[in-house]
Image (spheres, grey):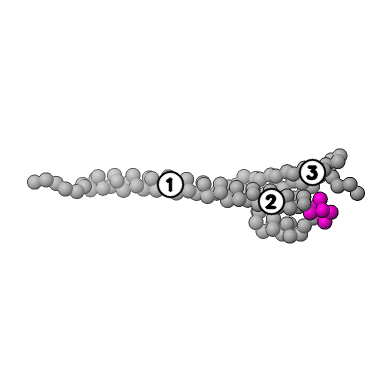
């Protein structure tokens, strides 16, 4: 007589191995999704910073739409500007989705009055 199929121990080992593989895959997925969200936030921050600089260069001052978009989509976002000599540096700081703090700087020549 030949035995076909698996013993209970073999089946339990297979299920345990599958469970371990699922836990590892879920952990990796969680990390990668947080990184993707953080990268999207960084891209959005740089675009907002560039928009702010464009408003400044056109002489329109600070854009309320950009400020509103920053506070809605980037947690803890603050934008500052600092003048030094003939340059002005715009700095944007925010708290990224993966828990790190983001920082973007953009320096341009100051407008002549």
- Secondary structure, mark 2, is helix
Q: Is residue 10 magenta?
A: no
Q: Residue furthest top?
A: 85
Which residue is identified by label 1? Answer: 25
Residue 57 rendering spot, x and y as whole percentages: 81, 50
Callout 3: few (<14), some (14-19), or many (20+) C-alpha neighbours within 10 Å? some
Would you say residue 31 is visible in this rendering? Answer: yes
- Residue 97 location in percent, x, y? 59, 50
- Are circles 3 and 1 on residues that touch, CB within 8 Å? no
Numbered badge on residue 47: 2
Q: Which range is magenta?
A: 55-61
**Residue 63 falls in which quadrant of the image?**
bottom right
Task: Identify the residue at horizontal 69%, vertical 55% (top origin).
Answer: 70
Q: Residue at x 66, y 45 (%)?
A: 102
Query: Marks 3 and 1: which is nearer the front?
Result: 3
- The disc at residue 108 is 3
Spatial CA span between label 2 and label 3 = 15 Å
């Amino acid at each position: 007589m030949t035995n076909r199929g698996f013993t209970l121990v073999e089946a339990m080992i297979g299920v345990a191995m599958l469970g371990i593989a699922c836990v590892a895959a879920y952990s990796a997925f969680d990390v990668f999704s947080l990184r993707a969200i953080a990268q999207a936030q960084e891209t959005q921050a740089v675009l907002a910073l560039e928009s702010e600089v464009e408003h400044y260069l056109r002489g329109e001052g600070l854009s309320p739409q950009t400020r509103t978009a920053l506070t809605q989509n980037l947690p803890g976002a603050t934008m500052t500007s600092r003048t030094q000599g003939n340059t002005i540096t715009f700095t944007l700081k925010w708290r990224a989705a993966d828990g790190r703090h983001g920082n973007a700087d953009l320096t341009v020549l100051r407008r002549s009055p």
